[in-house]
């Protein structure tokens, strides 16, 4: 149970593992309500989104309409964002990886992969690493970990650490960082 769900002192809880684990009665009821809403509204999910239903219901604290809307937003974002596929053969992406702007640090105590984003490299090469380029790099790494590093039923998330060492307050790209965090938190539920 502790590996699947994190319980907080406030009494709140958060599910960490969504696949290859038994759902509790409340979760089964929430998925049933989602399916009913989906059928009533003619919502068709692509196959890759089906296993994510419970994630979105958890994200929206069981609000079926909001979960469906968030899933639709993610589907649209993915269609647009990945219209041009991301590959490690992309010269800009390869250069960013070679510069060490983002790299896998290892795993934390929960065996989640840890990605380290070194902001000072993004600042140093700001003309090359636009916010859009940084998002493509992070999305590439997020997609890579979900496909090749996660272990279904054991490890289904990752940690992103933002290293602000060597970055002065005045040179901190706050708008770019806020945009990255906002996009990631909406689309990598």
Image (tube, helix red, strand yellow):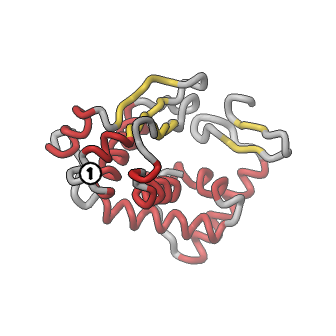
In the image: residue 112, left or right of residue 82: right
- Residue 131: quadrant of the picture: bottom left
Say if 68 sits above or below 185 in the image: below
Quadrant containing the N terminus in the rendered view: top right
* x then y, percent, for residue 25: 78, 48
Read off the residue under disc 1: 126
Q: Residue at x 62, y 52 (%)?
A: 54
The kind of secondary structure element at disc 1 is: loop
The foreground one among 178 and 109 is: 178
Badge 1 crowding class, 10 Å Cα cut-off, few under 14, some 14 to 19, many 20 or more, is some
- Residue 75: quadrant of the picture: bottom left
- Residue 106: quadrant of the picture: top left
Residue 102 can be seen, yes or no: yes
Say if 104 sits above or below 36 in the image: above
Q: Residue at x 47, y 30 (%)?
A: 113
Q: Residue at x 53, y 29 (%)?
A: 112
The foreground one among 2 and 112 is: 112
Residue 47 can be seen, yes or no: no
Q: Residue at x 66, y 53 (%)?
A: 58
* x then y, percent, for residue 89: 16, 40
* x then y, percent, for residue 172: 42, 51
The foreground one among 63 and 12 is: 12
The foreground one among 132 and 31 is: 132
């Amino acid at each position: 149970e502790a590996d699947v769900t994190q319980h907080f002192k406030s009494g709140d809880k958060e599910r960490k593992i969504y696949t290859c684990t038994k759902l509790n009665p409340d979760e089964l009821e929430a998925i049933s309500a989602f399916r009913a809403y989906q059928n009533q509204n003619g919502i068709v999910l692509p196959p890759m989104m089906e296993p994510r239903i419970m994630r979105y219901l958890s994200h929206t604290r069981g609000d079926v309409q909001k979960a469906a809307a968030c899933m639709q937003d993610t589907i649209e974002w993915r269609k647009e964002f990945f219209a041009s596929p991301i590959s490690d053969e992309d010269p800009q992406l390869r250069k960013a990886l070679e510069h060490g702007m983002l790299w896998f640090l290892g795993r934390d105590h929960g065996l989640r992969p840890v990605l380290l984003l070194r902001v000072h490299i993004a600042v140093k090469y700001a003309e090359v690493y636009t916010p859009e380029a940084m998002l493509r790099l992070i999305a590439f790494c997020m997609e890579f970990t979900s496909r090749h590093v996660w272990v279904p039923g054991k490890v289904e998330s990752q940690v992103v650490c933002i290293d602000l060492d060597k970055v002065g307050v005045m040179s901190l790209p706050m708008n770019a960082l806020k945009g990255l965090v906002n996009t990631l938190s909406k689309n990598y539920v």
